[in-house]
Amino acid sequence: MAEPDLPVLQRWMQGAILGRVAPPGLEALIVGDDRLSATQRLTLYARGYRARLAECLAAEFPCLKALAGEQVFQLFAASYIESQPPSDPSLYALGAGFADFLEATRPPGDRGPDALSALPADLARLDRARAEVQRAVGVERRPGPPPAADLLLTPGARLRRPDSVRLLNLGFDPAPLLAAVDRGGPIEPPEPCPTPVAVARSHYRVAVHRLTPWRFAWLEALGEAGDDVHVAAAQAARATGRETGAVIADLALWLPLAAEHGLVDGV
C-alpha cells in the first residue's frame, strides 16, 4: 500500500475509527507490537474518540441528558455520531444536527407534537439554541442606547432581531425543567403545553423568555435584517388574529423590556 498524502490519510483515519470493522490497509498504516496488534490499537483509539465526542454532546445538551438519563443519552449520542460523523474542524459544529436527527428517528406512528417521543428533539433544540446564543454576536457592545418605546411614534423606525436571539416553538414550558437542571435535582417529563420562547443573551447572560403569540410573531417578522416596527406589528396582528392598533399599544409597554432582555436592537 503506497503511503497516502495527509488529506487522504486523515479521511482514511476518520473512516477507520468510526467504522465497525478494520479497513483495508490497516497493517500498513498502524504498527502493532507484542502487546497490542494494529487492530487492537485502532479499536482502543476509536473507543476513546467516540467517548470524547459523546462527552462534547453531553456538555452541550444538559437538559436532554438530565431528562433522558445517562444510558439513554449515550445511546442517542452513539447513534448520532455513527449516522453523522463530524466533518468540521471545530467541535462546536458537532451538535448542530442533533435535534433534527432525534426528530427523524422518532418511532413510526408516534409523531404527534404532544407525544413523549417529541421531547428529545425539543430539548435538543432548546439546548442547541442556548449554545448558539452564547457564541453569537450580541447587543452588549451596542453603540447607542437601547431602543425606546418612543420609536413607535417615529415614522419608518426600524428595529432588528439580534443574532444572539433564537425563536423556538416548544411543546412544553421550559421554565420548570431549566430550574431543575440548574439545581441538579430529579427531572420529570414536562406536561404538553405549546410554548413559544425566545432564547436571548443580555449582559453576557443567556436566558429563555416565554413569549405571548403576538410577541413571538412580531420578533419573527422583524428578522435579523430588521424591519419597520409598524409593518412588523401589522404582520404579528394578522398572524395572531388581533387588531394592529392593539399590538402597537402592547408593544409600547413591552419594547423597553424587550430591549433590556436583548431581544431587539437598532438597525
Image (cartoon, helix red, strand yellow):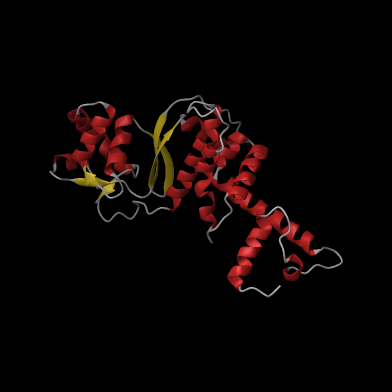
Would you place residue 14 above or below residue 5 in this image? Answer: above
Would you place residue 126 above or below residue 214 in this image? Answer: below
- Which residue is at a point 55% across and 27% down the rendered structure image? 109
* In the displayed structure image, the side of residue 63 where residue 243 appears, left or right: left
Residue 254 appears at what percent x and percent y?
27, 35
Residue 187 appears at what percent x and percent y?
58, 31
* In the displayed structure image, the side of residue 165 where residue 176 appears, left or right: right
Foreground residue among 69 and 185: 69
Q: Quadrant of the N terminus?
A: bottom right
Would you place residue 243 above or below residue 86 in this image? Answer: above
Q: Is residue 146 visible?
A: no
Residue 171 appears at what percent x and percent y?
46, 30
Foreground residue among 74 and 31: 31
Q: Is residue 78 visible?
A: yes
Q: Quadrant of residue 110?
A: top right
Foreground residue among 181 and 11: 11
Residue 5 appears at what percent x and percent y?
61, 74
Foreground residue among 39 and 231: 39
- Which residue is at a point 78% across and 64% down the rendered structure image? 38
* In the displayed structure image, the side of residue 171 where residue 257 appears, left or right: left
- Which residue is at a point 46% across and 29% down the rendered structure image? 173
Q: Quadrant of residue 142?
A: bottom left
